[in-house]
Image (tube, rainbow, N blue to C red):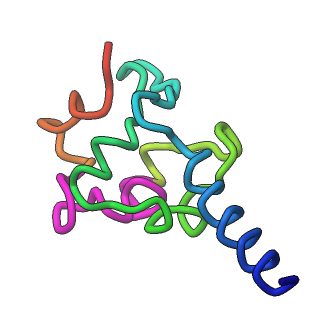
Amino acid sequence: MRIIAVVAMLVIIAFAGSALAVPAGKTVDYEGGGAGKVVFDGKSHADKGAKCNDCHPALFQMKTGAQKITMADINAGKSCGACHNGTKAFKADDAANCAKCHKK
């Protein structure tokens, strides 16, 4: 019985981590400087097949605002740039794609 309780707790903890990220219908807003704010919608990424653990915690910490994200880092293949490199997803440093993330 004790083993079942431990396994159940581990499952709950595992699912709670992904549930806390960006629940359906919610977004996370980032200041985007002069280019306009960036609104991250986890659902749009999930709809394209991305899973929470594809990015968390390797690329992004789970706590909102825990790290600073810059275009220089993205263009260097860090944070969003790990996927938004023109191979896996649209290229972030292509000026034609700015409005896909930045909203004025």
Characterize the magenta stretch by its predominant secondary structure.
Answer: loop
Location of residue 3 by image quarter: bottom right
Residue closer to the observer: 23 or 76: 23
Is 80 contained in the magenta span?
A: yes
The quadrant of the image that shows the N terminus is bottom right
> Among all residues in the image, which is located at the extreme front?
1
> Among all residues in the image, which is located at the extreme right?
2
Location of residue 14 by image quarter: bottom right
Find residue 23 and report its horizontal and vertical position in percent. 49, 38
Q: Is residue 94 above or below residue 48?
A: above
Is 10 contained in the magenta span?
A: no
Location of residue 77 by image quarter: bottom left
Find residue 13 and report its horizontal and vertical position in percent. 71, 63
Q: Is residue 31 above or below residue 83?
A: above
Query: Residue placed at 32% from the left, 27% from the top?
Result: 102
Query: Residue placed at 42% from the left, 22% from the top?
Result: 37
Find residue 27 and report its horizontal and vertical position in percent. 45, 29
- Which residues fall within the magenta stretch? 74-91
